[in-house]
Amino acid sequence: MRLLSPQRPEYGVNYGPGSVGFVHKRLEFADGLGAVVTAGIEYCTRWYRKPDYPVVTHVLGASGENLCIEANADGVDEDSLSPYFNDPKYTVYFRKPFGLTDSIAAAIVAKARTYVGCKYDDPLILADLLNNTLLGHAINGMTHDQVAEWLVKVMANPRKEICDEVWVLALAAQTQYAGLGTLAVPPALNDPQMLFGDERIWANDVVVIPGVKPTG
């Protein structure tokens, strides 16, 4: 992985269809519950964070100019990227799958769009939290993740999604990437940090786009 120098977003130059964005959000107490959620995701995903890799807590994917598909508390939507690009508390790290072509990019976005309108899978978030406590992590280590798989099977709703699931499913649906690394893991057992750090999937360069408050 090579983090490029921070830059401003240019559609078709440093991000575009097929670019998957991994979001770092600076913790601010003023965000209230949002800060608690972000801190909880950081806690749950710490096991999968590689040394010298940035902390990421959310996954989205570019679907057009200044547009992304993402799963938030209100479900899976196609949203503007402006809230990320224009807010200094966010940094978006865009990665492209290796060997990405226009046709593969279009297929990835088309697959992601099939999940737009799905509800957010809140019980799966709870399952992730339980699996990634100190006790849960120890139990899953002893059982080779059998307990984790059982828990998400019981609690996850196949008709609902969380942020990383959408893009794990969209990537894994492509012949070029199916079964690679974390894409072979059940989508409900993936997380943003695990997906971001799997070098079997991504091209080496990572585009770094820090949020900048508009002037004027």
Image (cartoon, helix red, strand yellow):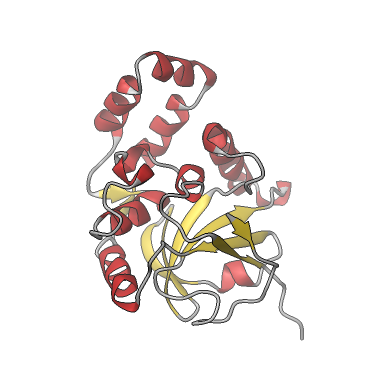
Residue at 62%, 46% (x, y): give it.
55
Query: In screen coordinates, is 76 left or right of 16?
Result: left
Viewer-side residue, 118 vs 141: 141
Quarter of the image where the C terminus is located: bottom right
Viewer-side residue, 208 vs 89: 208
Quarter of the image where the N terminus is located: bottom right
Query: In screen coordinates, is 2 left or right of 17?
Result: right
Residue at 64%, 39% (x, y): give it.
51
Residue at 40%, 19% (x, y): give it.
140
Query: In screen coordinates, is 82 left or right of 89?
Result: left
Viewer-side residue, 1 vs 121: 1
Q: 25 above or below 124?
A: below
The spot of residue 129 in percent (x, y) is 47, 30
User: What residue occupies the far bottom of the structure in this picture?
Assistant: 216
User: What residue occupies the far right of the structure in this picture?
Assistant: 216
The spot of residue 80 in percent (x, y) is 49, 73
Q: 70 above or below 44?
A: below
The spot of residue 188 in percent (x, y) is 33, 40
The spot of residue 81 in percent (x, y) is 52, 72
Viewer-side residue, 33 vs 9: 9
Residue at 43%, 65% (x, y): give it.
61
Q: Quadrant of residue 92?
A: bottom right
Number of disc labels? 0
Query: In screen coordinates, is 172 left or right of 44?
Result: left
